[in-house]
Image (cartoon, rainbow, N blue to C red):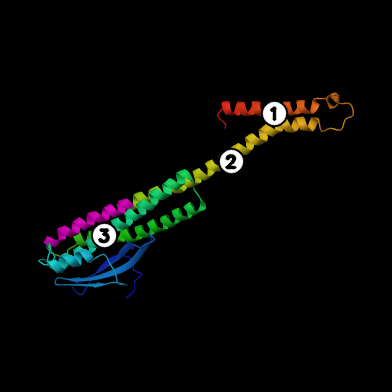
Amino acid sequence: MHTGQRPKLEEVEGMLFIVVKMLSLNDRQEIIAEQLSLILSPDLVISFQEQVGDVFEGVRERIRHGKGRIRKMGGDYLCYALLDAIIDNYFVVLEGIGEKIEILEEELVTDPTPKTLHEIHKLRGDMIFLRRSVWPLREVISELSRGDFTQISEEARIFYRDVCDHTIQVMDTVETCRDIISGMLDMYLSSISNKMNEVMKVLTIIATIFIPITFVAGVYGMNFKFMPELEWQWGYLAVWAVIISVAAAMLFYFKKKNWL
């Protein structure tokens, strides 16, 4: 009845009590977590879910149509089929997260925004939650595949080892995604720093061009009475010619140095 438990395995009165997290994605590609509890005895499987809707439709279809071993074997195989369906859906969740990572990586390269950083932090939180769900689940499945439980036959134990391998693959994928997301945070900071450097570069070039122009304007803005150039007919145009020439020469120099 308490749905905040971590994945675990307990043996009580000749039955196995298994708690796992069933994950799925909603329409907005957000992770929906639901606790699933299983009670397993040699001839009985009882499942408890929090809400309507799950990932077991494929299992139900196999039961309805008698496909595979599901009607020929006992409750241990049915329990395996349920756990396998849950873990297989973890790959669907990770695929959806992988698509979001690809979109964010493209944004980071082209035009990172504060919204991009928010999405990265959200993904990071999702991966932490996934790791907390998968890590203890791996221990549960490993114990089911190797433990000495009378509720699980030797024939069915082989299938539990297979689902244990799938769990390890999920864990490896989660760790890989975590590393990618950590790298994306560094990439975001680098992109923002590069954008700031580009802005500062442009402002510095503009300020550098105006330094000699300001000097010329300052010289001829002094209120001395005897300045020969002030009496020239073409003095005003000559000053403008000097200013434009200096600015053009500096722009040409910056362009030659690939600073523009």
Magenta stretch: dominant secondary structure: helix
State the CA–CA distance, disc 3 to disc 1: 71 Å
Q: Amino acid at mark 3?
A: Ile
| Residue 139 against residue 234 in the figure, above or below | below
Mark found first going from the N terminus, 1 or 2: 2
Where does the image place residue 182, in percent across and percent down from the top left?
42, 49
Task: Determine whether, in the image, residue 171 is placed left or right of residue 58.
Answer: right
Q: Name the residue tied to disc 3.
A: 87
User: Measuring 24% from the left and 60% from the top, which residue is drawn there?
Assistant: 141
Q: Tell me which segment is drawn in magenta.
A: 154-173
User: Measuring 44% from the left and 57% from the top, which residue is drawn there?
Assistant: 122
Q: Name the residue tied to disc 1.
A: 244
Q: Is residue 198 magenta?
A: no
Mark found first going from the N terminus, 3 or 2: 3
Q: Amino acid at mark 2?
A: Val
Task: Determine whether, in the image, residue 239 is placed left or right of residue 205.
Answer: right
Image quadrant holding the N terminus, namely bottom left
Q: Name the residue tied to disc 2.
A: 199
